[in-house]
Image (spheres, rainbow, N blue to C red):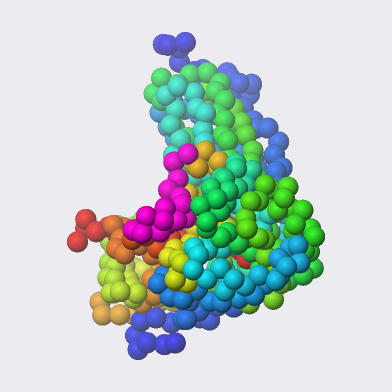
Amino acid sequence: MKTPFSLVALAAAALSVASALALEPGEKAPSFTLESASGKQVSLEDYAGKTVVLEWVNFDCPFVKKHYSSGNMPSLQEKYTTEGVVWLTVQSGPEGKLPSASQLEEKAEAAGNKATAVLRDPAGVVGKSYGAETTPHLFVINDEGEIAYMGGIDDKPDLKKESLETATNYVAAALDSLAEEEEVAVKKAAPYGCGVKY
Amino acid sequence: MAGMKPVIFAMSSLASISWALAGVKSGHAEAELFAASEGYAAGQPVQAALKLTLDEGWHSYWVNPGDSGMPVSIEWELPDGWVAGPLLYPIPERFVTSGMVGFGYAKEIVMPVFLTPGEEAAGDVTVKAKVDWLTCDDAACIPGEATLELTLGEGLGEPSKQAEEIEEAFQKVPQPMSGASLDVVREGDQVTLAIVLPATLDGEGAELIPATPNALNPEEQIVLGPGEGAWKAVVPAHEYAAESWESLEVVLVGGKLKAPLLLHWGKEME
């Protein structure tokens, strides 16, 4: 793309996940059907009328480990599923490069995962439809099926557990606002973590 | 110790020796801390550096790591009166892992830092640094950490064997230049950067790399072209850019530039 006198752009060498049609807050969450690590078919439509959280994961990623070994992610999962929120943990990426169904199930349990289900997206289609770029990367879907929040779990893109003490947790804030039927203050924030391996 | 002046010539062969522990391996990098001189002179900055030697295929990251990764963090334990400057980052490479643009380094990177003793500094001192970093390859990200020590003798002594390496690294750190300025105009998702350079410099073909994270879209390489009275680039804002900016930093490298430049724009300058 050349403009008369200013930018000379050289094409990037690799495919980009964020396309011109990237999902934005307020839009309908893309539907999907995926198999859980325990072998069940799970569809977004199964949870119509409920608030749903999608959490992209890779249990070997140090950023994911920060949130699990500290208990941060499991306690969010437990708290909000108790309140009726559906929490789906998703692993996108090819078989052979990522844990198999049974390995994923083991890793999730070892990490203390308390999600409603842990899903596998080996073709990466669902991850790409949401624009999941990092692990973790979270999406909160309101009970009308629209994206209420998308982005990082909080505002501290580092590996320090101490950061959790002062971090603003965007996901918890969005879920609390939805429960109070209030406007979600931060609908989009930069995700951080390891790249999703498509 | 107060009132004792260092007797440099008598001590230079013994006490004015800077030594550091051997490199510490953690994750996919080996970290070392060393200085350009054997010792220090009170009140004068010592050129030191953190070096990361990376395993084949792994990257460490720049101050703006791009869409994934994390810059190096360093926490100092310094003797009284000593001050450490910020870790200085040489111009990064641009690479893509898992479809995401990153800015950082492969193979090895030397990051200079100034350590300045107080006017009253005396005797051998040991400086400690706790360093944390992240390395990623196309398949994974692995953090690393190391606690490093550097001992400096009183009196400058001879240049160390790493002096040249540190000097080379300094030359790759972008520097501000008087007479160079950056203006930033944001209109929705489009950002126009206008750069004025001193007459001695030619900006044609120079690459512009955003140093402020999450500000400019890094997907395409940004190259300066001539504009009206200034060098220009028009770049999309980053997908996660804040609504408006207080400041922005970019670096310029390559093209006809002999040394990399650091340019800063601040709203207060308007």
B195 up-or-down from B28: above or below:
below
Between A193 and A154, the one nearer to me in the picture = A154
Residue at 56%, 68% in the rendered image? A47
A44 up-or-down from A6: above or below:
above
User: Over which residues does the magenta segment extend?
Assistant: A165-182
The majority secondary structure of the magenta stretch comes to: helix
Between B250 and B136, the one nearer to me in the picture = B136
Residue B159 in sight in this render: no
Between B138 and B179, the one nearer to me in the picture = B138
Residue at 49%, 63% in the rendered image? A51
Q: Is residue A122 magenta?
A: no
> Residue A149: horizontal and vertical position, in percent?
44, 63
Write down the quadrant of residue A142 in the picture: bottom left
Q: Quadrant of the C terminus of chain B?
A: bottom left
Residue at 41%, 70% in the rendered image? A25
Asked if residue B140 lies left or right of residue A25, the reply is right
> Residue A189: horizontal and vertical position, in percent?
43, 61
Q: How many marks?
A: 0
> Residue A122: horizontal and vertical position, in percent?
71, 72
Asked if residue B185 lies left or right of residue A43, the reply is left
Write down the quadrant of residue B199 in the picture: bottom left
Residue at 60%, 41% in the rendered image? A70
Residue B2 in sight in this render: yes
B149 up-or-down from A80: above or below:
above
> Residue A88: horizontal and vertical position, in percent?
60, 62
